[in-house]
Amino acid sequence: MPTRQRFVVSSVALIVTLAGSVHAQKAAKPGGGSNTLFPVTVEFRCPVSAECLVPDQIEGDTLGPYRGTTPAGSTTTQEGLASNYGGYFTEGNLLLFALKSGFGRFISFAFTRPAGTAPCVASGTCRKAFTSAITDVSVPGSRTYPVDAVGTDLPNGFMSIPVGQSARARLFLNFADPAGRDILWTVRFDPALHPGSTHLTVTRPESNRWTVEANESDIAGLVSANNGPSKIVKVNEGYYTMPFRLTVTK
């Protein structure tokens, strides 16, 4: 497995503030109600699987599955709590995956397979100065949205996919700047919000199990965003082939 650059975020509060302004992902449902989260297990294919002789471009660590945490004595939690960590289904059965420092768990990214020249090169606005990163913080948590043939979100998320079938899906996954700059990085598989990227695939082999996978023909977009003096400044940092797979068990 290639060496990956490791970093630890010094201020989770800073990332939360920046991420909230960039993505505007609401912790509450419209109308002010809370969103109950249901723990699930998320397990990355690499680096532990026998299939990983060729490393994935997005990988977990070697400590096994990431299980969503809940308050003592409860089987669920509410979105937005500082204690939430790991994998969850939302009330709409979307996959939420959150990392926070202090748990000793990481995910890693490799950007070694660019799909063409990044758009920011011509304008000289690129901020990417790394080819790999390891993070213990992903805030707001990654979300995966299964979609239909025209790209509309399925009404019941992962549960809308029949057993034995697949659906395309959009996904975003955040990580902090490896050098500690006030920049949030986002990997997107979402052609609607990030043209030039593609969807990836969610498959439901069993009633309580799904796989989320990007293959060799799928393209991820990379975006950097920082808080400018009066507005958020976003930069399209290019497109990458980033095969990976994770398994979700309810």
Image: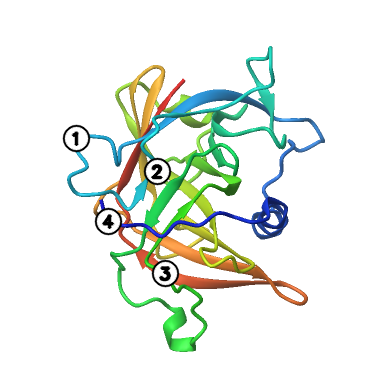
- Tell me which amino acid carries mark 4: Pro
Above or below for 103 versus 156: below
Q: Which dot, 2 or 1, sits closer to the camera?
A: 1
Marked residue nearer the N-terminal end (3 or 1): 1
Query: Crowdedness of circle 4 by 10 Å Cα count: few (<14), some, many (20+)?
Result: few
Task: Identify the residue at image location x=71%, y=44%.
Answer: 26
Marked residue nearer the N-terminal end (4 or 3): 4
Percent coordinates x, y for residue 4 in the rendering? 36, 57
Q: CA distance from mark 4 to mark 2?
A: 37 Å
Q: Quadrant of residue 36?
A: top right
Query: Crowdedness of circle 2 by 10 Å Cα count: few (<14), some, many (20+)?
Result: few
Which residue is label 3 attached to? 130
Are the two marked residues, 3 and 2, in contact with CB atoms closer than 8 angstroms? no
Marked residue nearer the N-terminal end (3 or 2): 3
Q: CA distance from mark 2 to mark 1?
A: 33 Å
Q: How is the image coloured?
A: rainbow
Which residue is label 4 attached to? 2
Task: Identify the residue at image location x=49%, y=87%.
Answer: 123
Q: Secondary structure at mark 3?
A: loop
Q: Secondary structure at mark 4?
A: loop
Which residue is label 1 attached to? 50
Q: Quadrant of residue 197?
A: bottom left
Can see residue 190? no
Numbered label attached to residue 149: 2
Percent coordinates x, y for residue 53 in the rendering? 17, 45
Q: Which dot, 3 or 2, sits closer to the camera?
A: 3
Q: Secondary structure at mark 1?
A: loop
- Tell me which amino acid carries mark 2: Ala
Which one is nearer the viewer's eye here, 94 or 249?
249
